[in-house]
Image (cartoon, coloured by chain):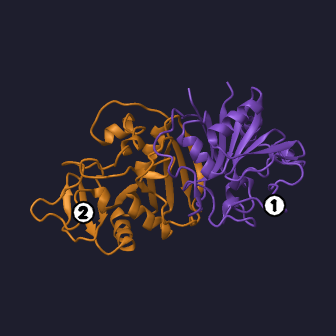
Chain colours: A orange, B purple
Amino acid sequence: MSRLRFRISMSLDGFIAGPRQSVDDPLGAGGMRLHEWVFPLAVWRSTHGLEGGEVNESSQVVEESLEDVGATIMGRNMFGGHPGPWDAKQPWEGWWGENPPFRHPVFVLTHHARAPLTLGGTTFTFVTDGIASALAAARWAAGGEDVALAGGADVARQFLAAGLVDEMELHLVPTLLGAGARLFDGVGDDLHGLHLVRTVATPRVTHLKFERP
Amino acid sequence: MSRLRFRISMSLDGFIAGPRQSVDDPLGAGGMRLHEWVFPLAVWRSTHGLEGGEVNESSQVVEESLEDVGATIMGRNMFGGHPGPWDAKQPWEGWWGENPPFRHPVFVLTHHARAPLTLGGTTFTFVTDGIASALAAARWAAGGEDVALAGGADVARQFLAAGLVDEMELHLVPTLLGAGARLFDGVGDDLHGLHLVRTVATPRVTHLKFERP
């Protein structure tokens, strides 16, 4: 069975992005602090075409998160650019340049239809009829492998509230953002069977992995 | 130097009590789930006059939290009972019965003046002029030992925002409450030098300890 696997970095106060997200500041004020643990890692650098880097307790966690993933789902805000209808002349093509690091089918949840976009080894398909449809298409495209749920907050909340997430790993960063996008806002008090199965503790980040039986 | 040490159990979504707290349900709906990790421990049971119990990875964390504490500060809501002025005929005497487990001076922050209350080995002193005054009195009463900050949310936020907490340990419980009292609401994005120094991971709870240099 192809599983839906969700991973995200979160502050102590529950934010996965800071306030005032924009094209110039996609992670919001202070949001970069949530990701500082990953940038030095050799495994992160290699997926972004960079050499060198560290190997530490977080490396295995990141490597594992990349294994057996055949498709990715993300929200429009994570794909990025302006809100509302796509610019007809110069439609936004994502944050990742000509060779995005996914290299498998990516499904972008949006209210605004658009033809698929291929950049390097990644094709972005724009889904306008909701999370169940996106998940069905992503599972099909993954060809038996798992599906990664990338975020952002709004799409993640919808999948969590619907009980569709089979695995969740929170990269809890020991910092406060004070404001921004809260992961669990409106999700309710039900983890739908997700329970803590592993903790990897480092000074920079605590990796909390949840699974459903 | 006598340090102010703060310990509290918090859900994944940042709540330290559930919604609809009342005299009948002081932890709010679902709030008991934040404390289920501690009740089976022998060290918790012995401080509450009970025998037996478990010893596990959390035991050392709880034992440490009880060491070298000479006074405790708490908010009116944690001391409990009705809101507003104290009942003149039958003033609320706390949740803990005739022999509260503190057995050292406790300072209760409140807007409503009241004479000190002694129960067993614990004297509750009611402080109406704010956190700095409560901390000064508690430090004096602790006689060189540390001061514990017990909560609840409102008083904890005031001490955190003022940068007065020298040590913080979050007992992060892998559950959602969905609503209630959020620890870090309004605290801002500044931990005032508190940084993660130790993580103790168990299946039921993750103990995240922060200190200031």
Residue under circle 1?
B88
Q: Pointers 1 and 2 in contact (CB under 8 A)?
A: no
Rate crowding at label 1 as few (under 14), some (14 to 19) or many (20 or more) other CA atoms within 10 Å.
few
Q: What chain does badge 2 belong to? A: A
Rate crowding at label 2 as few (under 14), some (14 to 19) or many (20 or more) other CA atoms within 10 Å.
few
Identify the amino acid type marked 2. Pro
Residue B198 percent across, percent down from the top left: 60, 34
In which quadrant of the rendered view does residue A147 lie?
Answer: bottom left
Tell me which residue sits at (38%, 68%) in the image: A135
Residue B21 percent across, percent down from the top left: 67, 64
Residue B82 visible, this angle: yes
* Secondary structure of the residue carrying numbered label 2: loop
* Residue B152 left/right relative to B53: left
Residue B200 visible, this angle: no
* Residue B72 left/right relative to A159: right
* Secondary structure of the residue carrying numbered label 1: loop
In which quadrant of the rendered view does residue A190 lie?
Answer: bottom right
Tell me which residue sits at (38%, 43%) in the image: A30
Residue under circle 2?
A83
